[in-house]
Amino acid sequence: MFNNPISAQISYQTRRQFKIKRYERLNLIVSFVIAPLLAWLSAFIFRSDTDLVQNQAYPNFLFFMLISGVFFGLIGSVFEIINDRRTVQRERIGGVSIFGYYISKYYVLSFFGLIQTILYNVIGMIFLNIPVLLVAFNSLIMFLVVVVSISFGLFISSLTRSNMIASNLIPVLIIPQILLGGLIPYSHMDKSIYMWETNYDKAPPIARIMPIKYAYESIITGNIAFTRGNNEINDQISQMVDYLQDNQFMSIDKESFISNFKCSFCNKTWFYNILVIISYIVGTFVLGLIIFYRRIFNG
């Protein structure tokens, strides 16, 4: 493995990116201060009761935790490749691997996103008395949201040519996810968002292209699945989740291609949605890499 030039390039580029990040001390400090600060603010606002079971605002905290993950991922990645493009074009002549550069960006940004995720969830655990098992699951979903946002950010950074255009696209990527992520009930919206569908118990088609929809549905149904006893289930989440109808929005079980596999969780909504989020990560990573190659070779 270590004799593989690609492996050596990835290792070299990863060390280089870490070194660059260490020199950006102000940005690192701001990043690691913002995460616990936003966590404290969200926990303070959405703590209607110190008992997690009675806290009616706990689902709101989970949603804005995921939106914070979108914010962390996009802000950390959307300008990265734009700023380095000319440098990579020069270094390519000297044999620097474009793939090694791109994936090292991905690794390093994901590492710092993981730290922000842990900081956020630790603060939430302290202020909202969230059990450790749920903290671990919530952290997993938030980290997946951070990573998929990094993938989208690198994709946008590969696609655009200026920081101004990239910065203008950030609200376009965040605001629709806030509106259609599931916190606001779809039944309260205009029925035209369902387009050709008449089943208003499902998420509308336009919402089903939003990664945050799958993350929010996963984290809500997963909080049910990973709560040890009925007395520990948050009352508001229990009301949100539909126990009876499969394949509806916020239902516990979902019929899909993985339901036929013999495992205890293959028909669970939280697990299916995690796979959907991973597919978003892989798809946007590949698209971003292809566009990045075209930009480097074609100018």
Image (cartoon, helix red, strand yellow):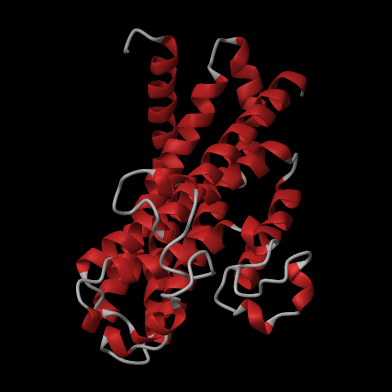
Give the total number of marks visible in the rendering.
Answer: 0
Q: Position of residue 208 (x, y in %)?
A: 63, 59
Residue 293 horizontal side relative to residue 18, left or right: right
Q: Position of residue 70 (x, y in %)?
A: 53, 59
Pick the front one: 111 or 222: 222
> From this viewpoint, is residue 19 visible?
yes
Residue 92 horizontal side relative to residue 115, left or right: right
Residue 253 higher or lower than 46, as above or below: above
> From this viewpoint, is residue 27 visible?
no
For image coordinates 62% across by 65% down, the residue present is: 177
Q: Position of residue 130 (x, y in %)?
A: 26, 75
For image coordinates 61% across by 30% down, the residue present is: 289
Q: Please state, as top left, top right, bottom left or bottom right, where the N terminus lies in the image.
A: top left
Q: Hey, which quadrant is residue 191 in on the image? A: bottom right
For image coordinates 54% across by 30% down, the residue present is: 102
Pick the front one: 207 or 197: 197
Q: Residue furthest top?
A: 3
Q: Hey, which quadrant is residue 172 in on the image? A: bottom right
Q: Hey, which quadrant is residue 241 in on the image? A: bottom left
Q: Position of residue 195 (x, y in %)?
A: 78, 66
For image coordinates 77% across by 24% down, the residue present is: 299
Residue 162 higher or lower than 208, as above or below: above
